[in-house]
Image: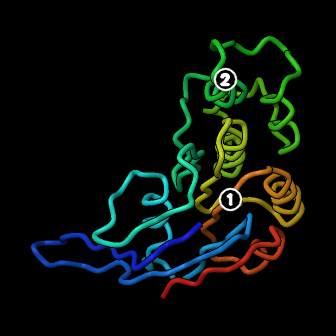
Amino acid sequence: MKIENLSFSFMDKAVEKKVFDGLNLESDSRIICIMGHSGCGKTTLLHILAGLLKPSSGTVSDFPDKVSIMFQEDRLLPWLNAYENVALVQGTPFERWNGQDDRSSRILRSLDIDPAMDIGSMSGGMKRRVALARALAFDSKALLLDEPFKGMDEDLTARAADLVRKQDKLTIVSTHSEAEAEALGAEILRLH
């Protein structure tokens, strides 16, 4: 992945606000953690990499075009259960949960989630795990994860990080936690 002279700004009450200016990164690492204070552009960079935002200037090259993204918000479908939210992204005809033991249910169980559980009865941390499972289940060439371990205890974070590490794809993670970056074995990109 190569980022050259990337800049992004937006208008706020007729005043241009720069998020970052002239960002450069070249890396062959498989896992990169973006770190920095709130508002420094971590989420914005993920959205640019996903093609959801267009930079003001600069280029991104050698980055896969088929990405899976886990947003800061869980974006789950509340009328579906955990399994159905995950299975929805697998590119096969939609299936209701009927006890099957497939990739979706295995990922959920590895994150301590009952596949049959209703989204409405979950805590915030459980919803994050379902959102992470959905991102992992999608057949992509790159993973973009925004605060994926929020609401998880140390043991669950370690297991979730292990799942992420086992994916054979470029992974970019936004986090505030040095411990999470270490658990992922990631190269660190600090935004200021």
Residue 69 in percent (x, y) is at 57, 48
Residue closest to the far front = 62
Kind of residue at badge 2: Glu
- Name the mark on residue 84: 2
Q: The residue tagged with tag 2: helix, strand or loop?
A: helix
Kind of residue at badge 1: Thr
For this rendering, which residue is in front, 157 or 32?
32
Q: How is the image coloured?
A: rainbow
Q: Earlier in the sequence, mark 1 or mark 2?
A: 2
Above/below status of 61 relative to 71: below
Above/below status of 83 relative to 97: below
Residue 114 in percent (x, y) is at 82, 31
Q: The residue tagged with tag 1: helix, strand or loop?
A: strand
Residue 143 in percent (x, y) is at 64, 52
**Residue sitting at 48 percent across and 59 percent down?**
49
Residue 73 in the figure: left or right of residue 22: right
Residue 65 in the figure: left or right of residue 133: left
Q: Dot 2, how many residues are within 10 Å of its Cα: few (below 14), some (14-19), or many (20+)?
A: many
Q: Dot 1, how many residues are within 10 Å of its Cα: few (below 14), some (14-19), or many (20+)?
A: many
**Residue 109 falls in which quadrant of the image?**
top right
Residue receiving disc 1: 171
Residue 187 in the figure: left or right of residue 102: left
Q: Which quadrant would the N terminus be assigned to in this image?
A: bottom right
- Work out how far the residue at label 1 is from the one at label 2, CA to CA, in angstroms: 24 Å
